[in-house]
Protein backbone atom coordinates (compact mmCIF):
# COMPACT_ATOMS: atom_id res chain seq x y z
CA UNK A 1 0.00 0.00 0.00
CA UNK A 2 1.77 3.13 -1.21
CA UNK A 3 1.40 6.21 0.94
CA UNK A 4 2.65 9.71 0.31
CA UNK A 5 3.11 12.79 2.46
CA UNK A 6 3.50 16.27 1.08
CA UNK A 7 5.00 18.49 3.70
CA UNK A 8 5.25 22.24 3.68
CA UNK A 9 8.71 23.56 4.60
CA UNK A 10 8.28 26.70 6.72
CA UNK A 11 6.18 25.79 9.74
CA UNK A 12 6.49 21.99 9.85
CA UNK A 13 10.28 21.85 9.24
CA UNK A 14 11.66 25.38 9.70
CA UNK A 15 10.92 27.88 12.42
CA UNK A 16 10.81 31.30 10.75
CA UNK A 17 9.65 33.29 13.78
CA UNK A 18 13.03 34.90 14.45
CA UNK A 19 13.39 36.00 10.81
CA UNK A 20 9.96 37.64 10.91
CA UNK A 21 10.75 39.30 14.23
CA UNK A 22 14.10 40.65 13.07
CA UNK A 23 12.41 42.10 9.97
CA UNK A 24 9.80 43.68 12.24
CA UNK A 25 12.54 45.36 14.32
CA UNK A 26 14.27 46.58 11.16
CA UNK A 27 11.05 48.07 9.73
CA UNK A 28 10.24 49.73 13.05
CA UNK A 29 13.63 51.45 13.04
CA UNK A 30 13.48 52.40 9.34
CA UNK A 31 9.99 53.88 9.39
CA UNK A 32 10.29 55.66 12.73
CA UNK A 33 10.97 59.40 12.52
CA UNK A 34 14.02 60.55 14.50
CA UNK A 35 12.03 61.94 17.44
CA UNK A 36 9.18 59.47 17.27
CA UNK A 37 8.51 57.20 20.23
CA UNK A 38 7.44 53.69 19.22
CA UNK A 39 6.28 50.64 21.14
CA UNK A 40 8.51 47.68 20.39
CA UNK A 41 6.48 44.51 20.73
CA UNK A 42 8.20 41.54 22.38
CA UNK A 43 8.89 38.57 20.16
CA UNK A 44 6.12 36.53 21.74
CA UNK A 45 3.61 39.39 21.42
CA UNK A 46 4.59 39.91 17.80
CA UNK A 47 4.49 36.23 16.88
CA UNK A 48 1.10 35.71 18.49
CA UNK A 49 -0.25 38.59 16.33
CA UNK A 50 1.16 36.87 13.23
CA UNK A 51 -0.34 33.55 14.32
CA UNK A 52 -3.69 35.29 14.77
CA UNK A 53 -3.33 36.72 11.24
CA UNK A 54 -3.50 40.32 12.41
CA UNK A 55 -2.77 42.50 9.34
CA UNK A 56 0.62 44.23 9.08
CA UNK A 57 -0.99 47.67 9.17
CA UNK A 58 -2.55 46.83 12.51
CA UNK A 59 0.77 45.55 13.85
CA UNK A 60 2.18 48.92 12.75
CA UNK A 61 -0.61 50.73 14.66
CA UNK A 62 0.03 48.67 17.79
CA UNK A 63 3.72 49.60 17.54
CA UNK A 64 2.94 53.31 17.58
CA UNK A 65 2.50 54.17 13.89
CA UNK A 66 -0.93 55.73 14.09
CA UNK A 67 -0.44 57.73 10.92
CA UNK A 68 -1.97 55.92 7.92
CA UNK A 69 0.97 56.75 5.65
CA UNK A 70 3.46 55.32 8.10
CA UNK A 71 1.55 52.11 8.65
CA UNK A 72 1.28 51.56 4.89
CA UNK A 73 5.01 52.25 4.46
CA UNK A 74 5.72 49.81 7.30
CA UNK A 75 3.62 47.08 5.67
CA UNK A 76 5.30 47.62 2.29
CA UNK A 77 8.82 47.56 3.69
CA UNK A 78 8.02 44.43 5.68
CA UNK A 79 6.76 42.62 2.59
CA UNK A 80 9.76 43.72 0.52
CA UNK A 81 12.23 42.59 3.20
CA UNK A 82 10.94 39.38 4.77
CA UNK A 83 12.09 37.07 1.98
CA UNK A 84 15.55 38.57 1.52
CA UNK A 85 19.06 37.93 2.73
CA UNK A 86 20.50 38.28 5.31
CA UNK A 87 17.23 37.57 7.12
CA UNK A 88 16.97 33.94 5.98
CA UNK A 89 19.92 33.19 8.23
CA UNK A 90 17.65 33.66 11.26
CA UNK A 91 15.60 30.57 10.32
CA UNK A 92 16.05 27.52 12.52
CA UNK A 93 15.38 23.84 11.92
CA UNK A 94 12.60 22.61 14.21
CA UNK A 95 14.05 19.97 16.58
CA UNK A 96 11.62 17.18 15.87
CA UNK A 97 11.64 17.60 12.09
CA UNK A 98 14.53 15.22 11.37
CA UNK A 99 13.28 12.37 13.61
CA UNK A 100 9.82 12.85 12.12
CA UNK A 101 11.08 12.62 8.54
CA UNK A 102 13.29 9.64 9.44
CA UNK A 103 10.32 7.83 10.92
CA UNK A 104 8.20 8.42 7.82
CA UNK A 105 11.02 7.28 5.57
CA UNK A 106 11.60 4.11 7.61
CA UNK A 107 7.91 3.30 7.26
CA UNK A 108 8.27 3.47 3.50
CA UNK A 109 6.14 6.60 3.14
CA UNK A 110 6.92 8.53 -0.04
CA UNK A 111 8.01 12.04 0.98
CA UNK A 112 7.61 15.24 -1.00
CA UNK A 113 8.19 18.85 0.06
CA UNK A 114 5.86 21.58 -1.17
CA UNK A 115 6.76 25.16 -0.39
CA UNK A 116 6.26 28.73 -1.54
CA UNK A 117 9.98 29.31 -1.19
CA UNK A 118 11.82 30.01 -4.38
CA UNK A 119 14.35 27.42 -5.50
CA UNK A 120 17.27 29.65 -4.49
CA UNK A 121 15.70 30.10 -1.03
CA UNK A 122 15.10 26.38 -0.54
CA UNK A 123 17.98 24.40 -1.98
CA UNK A 124 20.82 25.88 0.11
CA UNK A 125 18.80 25.06 3.25
CA UNK A 126 18.13 21.50 2.10
CA UNK A 127 21.90 21.12 1.72
CA UNK A 128 22.74 22.89 4.96
CA UNK A 129 20.66 20.45 7.02
CA UNK A 130 21.21 17.39 4.84
CA UNK A 131 17.51 17.18 3.97
CA UNK A 132 17.88 15.95 0.41
CA UNK A 133 18.08 12.41 1.75
CA UNK A 134 14.32 12.73 2.40
CA UNK A 135 13.29 14.48 -0.82
CA UNK A 136 14.57 13.35 -4.21
CA UNK A 137 14.67 16.09 -6.86
CA UNK A 138 11.34 15.03 -8.41
CA UNK A 139 9.75 15.32 -4.94
CA UNK A 140 10.68 18.98 -4.48
CA UNK A 141 7.86 21.40 -5.36
CA UNK A 142 8.83 25.06 -4.99
CA UNK A 143 8.59 28.29 -6.96
CA UNK A 144 11.02 28.94 -9.78
CA UNK A 145 13.36 31.83 -9.10
CA UNK A 146 11.67 33.99 -11.72
CA UNK A 147 8.07 33.05 -10.84
CA UNK A 148 5.83 36.08 -10.35
CA UNK A 149 4.05 35.50 -7.06
CA UNK A 150 0.36 36.29 -6.67
CA UNK A 151 -0.97 35.18 -3.28
CA UNK A 152 -0.16 31.97 -1.46
CA UNK A 153 -3.71 30.63 -1.55
CA UNK A 154 -3.56 30.79 -5.36
CA UNK A 155 0.07 29.84 -5.94
CA UNK A 156 0.19 26.78 -3.70
CA UNK A 157 -2.66 24.90 -5.42
CA UNK A 158 -0.67 25.29 -8.68
CA UNK A 159 2.16 23.32 -7.10
CA UNK A 160 -0.28 20.67 -5.93
CA UNK A 161 -1.78 20.48 -9.40
CA UNK A 162 1.67 19.83 -10.85
CA UNK A 163 2.41 17.19 -8.22
CA UNK A 164 -0.86 15.35 -8.82
CA UNK A 165 -0.21 15.31 -12.56
CA UNK A 166 3.44 14.26 -12.41
CA UNK A 167 3.84 11.83 -9.53
CA UNK A 168 2.95 8.14 -9.67
CA UNK A 169 -0.38 7.30 -8.07
CA UNK A 170 -0.54 6.19 -4.46
CA UNK A 171 -3.29 4.64 -2.36
CA UNK A 172 -3.27 7.36 0.25
CA UNK A 173 -1.78 10.84 0.42
CA UNK A 174 -1.78 13.72 2.88
CA UNK A 175 -0.67 17.33 2.94
CA UNK A 176 0.94 18.64 6.12
CA UNK A 177 1.25 22.41 6.52
CA UNK A 178 0.86 25.37 8.82
CA UNK A 179 -1.34 27.81 6.85
CA UNK A 180 -4.57 28.13 4.93
CA UNK A 181 -2.56 27.94 1.67
CA UNK A 182 -1.59 24.35 2.48
CA UNK A 183 -5.13 23.39 3.46
CA UNK A 184 -6.66 24.97 0.35
CA UNK A 185 -4.04 23.41 -1.96
CA UNK A 186 -4.83 20.00 -0.48
CA UNK A 187 -8.62 20.39 -0.49
CA UNK A 188 -8.61 21.61 -4.12
CA UNK A 189 -7.21 18.23 -5.19
CA UNK A 190 -9.03 16.01 -2.71
CA UNK A 191 -5.96 15.43 -0.56
CA UNK A 192 -6.60 15.20 3.21
CA UNK A 193 -4.96 18.10 5.09
CA UNK A 194 -3.23 17.92 8.46
CA UNK A 195 -2.49 21.33 9.95
CA UNK A 196 0.35 21.84 12.42
CA UNK A 197 0.53 24.43 15.19
CA UNK A 198 4.33 24.79 15.00
CA UNK A 199 4.09 27.58 12.41
CA UNK A 200 2.55 30.94 11.65
CA UNK A 201 -1.13 30.20 12.41
CA UNK A 202 -2.89 29.37 15.66
CA UNK A 203 -5.69 26.89 16.31
CA UNK A 204 -8.47 29.45 15.81
CA UNK A 205 -7.18 30.52 12.39
CA UNK A 206 -6.60 26.96 11.18
CA UNK A 207 -10.05 25.78 12.28
CA UNK A 208 -11.65 28.27 9.86
CA UNK A 209 -10.32 26.23 6.93
CA UNK A 210 -11.48 22.87 8.26
CA UNK A 211 -8.39 20.69 7.85
CA UNK A 212 -8.94 16.99 8.58
CA UNK A 213 -6.74 17.28 11.69
CA UNK A 214 -4.94 19.97 13.67
CA UNK A 215 -1.91 18.68 15.59
CA UNK A 216 1.08 20.11 17.46
CA UNK A 217 3.89 19.47 14.99
CA UNK A 218 5.30 17.31 12.21
CA UNK A 219 5.94 14.23 14.34
CA UNK A 220 2.33 14.29 15.59
CA UNK A 221 1.16 14.68 11.99
CA UNK A 222 3.17 11.67 10.86
CA UNK A 223 1.83 9.63 13.78
CA UNK A 224 -1.69 10.49 12.62
CA UNK A 225 -0.87 9.18 9.15
CA UNK A 226 0.64 5.99 10.53
CA UNK A 227 -2.39 5.32 12.71
CA UNK A 228 -4.93 5.76 9.93
MG1 LIG B 1 4.31 27.21 5.91
Image (tube, rainbow, N blue to C red):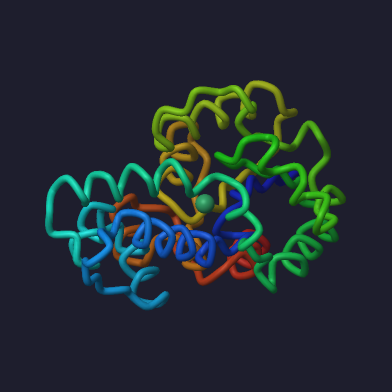
Q: At 22% across and 67% down in the image, what residue appears?
A: 35
Question: Which residue appears at 29% of the width and 65% of the height?
Answer: 204
| Residue 228 seen in the current view | no
Image vertical order of residue 28 relative to residue 38, above or below: above
- State which quadrant residue 24 falls in: bottom left
Identity of the residue drawn at 26% across and 61% down:
59
Residue 222: image location, x then y, percent: 65, 62
In the rendered image, the quadrant that contains the C terminus is bottom right
Quarter of the N terminus within the rendering: top right
Q: Closest to the observer: 169 or 86?
A: 86
Position of residue 145 relative to residue 28, above or below, is: above
Give the camera-side residue of 192 and 64.
64
Q: Quadrant of residue 214?
A: bottom left
Residue 195's spot in the image, x, y percent?
A: 48, 58
Res 98 visible: yes
User: Of residues 174 and 114, which is closer to you in this image?
Assistant: 114
Position of 58 with respect to 200 (left or right) is left
Q: Is residue 39 left or right of residue 129?
A: left
Residue 30 point in image, percent of width and height: 37, 55
- 202 lies left or right of 109: left
Q: Position of residue 187 (x, y in %)?
A: 44, 39
Residue furthest toward the front?
Answer: 34
In this view, the residue farthest toward the left is 67
Residue at coordinates 52% horizontally, 40% vertically from top-left? 191
Camera-side residue: 94 or 35?
35
- 147 w.r.t. 118: above or below: above
Number of numbered discs:
0
Amino acid sequence: MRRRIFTDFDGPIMDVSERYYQVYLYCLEKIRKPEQVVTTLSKSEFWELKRSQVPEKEIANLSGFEDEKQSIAFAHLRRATVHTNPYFSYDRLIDIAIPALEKAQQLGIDLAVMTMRRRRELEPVLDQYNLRRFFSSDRIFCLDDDYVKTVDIQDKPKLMKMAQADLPEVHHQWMIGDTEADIIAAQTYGVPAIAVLSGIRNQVQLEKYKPNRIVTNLICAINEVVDL
